[in-house]
Image (tube, helix red, strand yellow):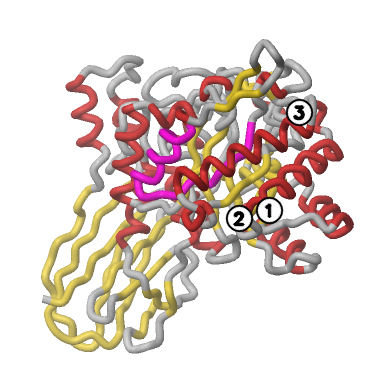
Amino acid sequence: MTKILTSSATRPRSQTYRQCVGSCHAYITLREDWRQHSAMVQKAVGFKQCRFHGIFNDWMGCCKRTDEGAIVTNFVNVDKAYQGILDLGMKPFVELGFMPEVLASGSQTCFHYKANVTPPRDYTEWCDFINEFVQHLIDQFGKNEVCTWRFEVWNEPDLSYFWEGADMDEYFKLYEATVRTIKSIDAGIRVGGPATSKNAWVREMLAYCESTNTPLDFISTHHYSSDSALEIGLPSTEIMYFGQKKMLNDVSMVRQLIDDSAFPTAELHYTEWNISPVHNDRFGKDSEFTMTFILQTLKDLGDIPDSYSFWAINDIFEESGPGEGPYSGKYGLVNIHGIPKPAFHAYAFLSQLFDHEHLTDNESLIATTDGENFRLLAWNHCEPSSHDFSGADWIINEKEHHETIQLHGLNGRYRICAWQVDRTMGNSYRAWQEMGEPFYLTKKNIEALNQAAEPVLVKDEIVIADSDLQVMHTLPTNALIYYEISAC
């Protein structure tokens, strides 16, 4: 039994989960369906920042070279992308990359949209371009606004797929040139990196910035509970699942590195995280397992990171091309038709909780209050005994969880409502499987899946509390239950 003394002191509930969310690449944010789906997520969650790749990708048309060799900039699409983010109630978390073709030293590219991943051919040209870019943002959006944004240099330069040769020394050269250019415009603009995969280069980045007196406002990095080189075509047998608790271990380790460095006040931003980086891992991205993994991870981490950016806000995500079906292992909270996936409910219910939390020793419960009413979120996360990143279900160590939660110190009449999501309730992915996994959805299919995605009301009753109020539930494997307990 979990006993909560309702007269005891509370603490502010962690808001780390909503500080940032990821997306695909900049040009995608101009699409109508991306904006519609993101608006739906925003209404339910209210993320504060949004980060995406490719603001300098040639699809955005940021710059060209004249016949005389001069660089001419054009930030019309940049303005549309960032204004769209602002219109959704978020601020841009600006990822500076990838390299415009006319500034690039080579021809290596990544992703479906052919983003150039080579260093600048001329660092003076690059710095002039960055200077024009940031000056333009200040002119367009105002200095006070831009100083509330964060600027992150590149994406995963520790991987040769995203930075030619995974050359750390060259990356540090790029970082130093970039941050000094931005700081010369306004020292208040926050800049950081190294935006690496798997917590890489953090120690080296801190040491480099200390030794060269290079500004560093934040450390950013990425991680997944499944480890791979992120090389396209890597066999799934070479990807290992290390377990949900890896997330806390990683974040705690990186935070300690910062605390022990010459930059102890630097922010820590995880600008990508999810269960696995594999694009066709349906179970790890689309199932109920994702939902409870999210909840357990966010509960474990609390306020250790300054932001923890789930990858990603929706399935309009085309790094490897358009989604291969309605549920194809893309990273989003809603699918390509805007239908909520189980992961959506983790964030939506977190956002419905009150802002003050009662401390308990229950690692799978968040109990909140507004001083009179109570909202509780509980879950049963079960880890796998084996995994399959090709799209099939993983084998889970299944276990029901029986629980009693006692709210002590309540008297009077209360209404208790509870909603549940699990394999059979509120689960559009499983409903799609029951349909026979159609590749193309009809309007009727979409309506049915949206209905299937609705959390199920499993309790609605009036009780009279006499000092104690109890709620009891039995949760199946990888399920959640959300309670609203209201004085009436």
Residue named by callout 2: 189
Residue 163 placement, left or right of 464: right
Q: The C terminus is located in which quarter?
A: bottom left
Task: Give the image location of residue 422, x and y in percent.
Answer: 34, 45
Crowding around mark 1 (Cα neighbors within 10 Å: few <14, some 14 to 19, many 20+) is some
Q: Residue at x 38, y 61 (%)?
A: 378
- Mark 2 to mark 1 CA distance (whole Å): 7 Å
Residue named by callout 3: 120
Q: Of helix, strand and loop, which one carries label 3?
A: loop
Residue 162 placement, left or right of 425: right
Q: Amino acid at mark 1?
A: Lys
Proximity of marks 2 and 1: CB atoms separated by less than 8 Å: yes
Residue named by callout 1: 183
Is residue 309 found inside the magenta-colored segment of the image?
Answer: no
Task: Give the image location of residue 62, x and y in percent.
Answer: 56, 26
Of residues 317 and 363, the one drawn nearer to the viewer in this rendering: 317
Q: Which quarter of the figure has residue 254?
A: bottom right
